[in-house]
Amino acid sequence: MEVEMEEEEEEEEMEEEEEEVMEEEEEEEVMEEEEMEEEEEEEEEEEVMEEEMQEEEEMEEVMKEEEKVMEEEEEVMEEEEMEEEEEEEEEEEVMEEEEMEEEEEMEEEEVMEEEEVMEEEEMEEEEEVMEEEEEMEEEETAAAILICSHTKAPPSPHLDLLCSACQSLSPLSSSDSNDCVLSSLSKTSAFGPSPASASD
């Protein structure tokens, strides 16, 4: 009986040991599985991190390219602004030159008008002077010219061209002689004696 009991105990112990071994193995398997899962998770996380890093790098590259594009656009805009400013300056210069030319032309026109006015005034003055001189000459001639009915001499401002019978007579009086009548130019024509003297 004792032997049987011992055998039973041994068997129980063996069974317990086997159970423990099995449990340990199962635990080990579980641990291994957990480790594998952890490793997989870590790998996945690493992959995700790498992908994120790649995305960040790509985003950085895209940002850099966008910055370059922006810089180029800014340069183009600056160049266009510079060109526009230069064009505006050139247009302003051209406008100023045209204004200066117009002012010079206006000044020249004013000078020409003033000169024309001056010339007209000078011409008018000269005409007035000529008219005055002509009037004075006519008055002097009318007061001086005598016509002799004897010699039929043409009108002359010189009394010594008349005949000797007329030289002693005054142009305002002919009462001293019945043969020669002296008349002023206002009483006779410029080409012959008056009808009164011709009738004598």
Image (cartoon, rainbow, N blue to C red):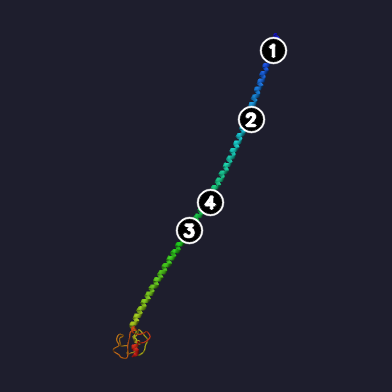
- The CA distance from mark 3 to mark 2 is 80 Å
Q: Amino acid at mark 2?
A: Glu
Which quadrant is home to the C terminus? Answer: bottom left
- The numbered mark, 3 or 2, whose residue comes first in the sequence reads 2
Q: Amino acid at mark 1?
A: Glu
- The CA distance from mark 2 to mark 1 is 46 Å
Locate residue 176, reporting x and y percent.
Answer: 29, 89
Q: Which mark is residue 95?
A: 3
The local secondary structure at tag 3 comes to helix
Q: From the viewer's perspective, is residue 106 above or below residue 128?
A: above
Q: Residue placed at 56% from the left, 43% from the top?
A: 66
Q: Amino acid at mark 4?
A: Glu
Q: Which residue in the protein does label 4 denote?
A: 80
- The numbered mark, 3 or 1, whose residue comes first in the sequence reads 1
Can the viewer see residue 166? no
Q: Which residue in the protein does label 1 denote?
A: 8
Task: Give the foreground label among 1 and 4.
Answer: 1
The local secondary structure at tag 4 comes to helix
- The CA distance from mark 3 to mark 4 is 22 Å
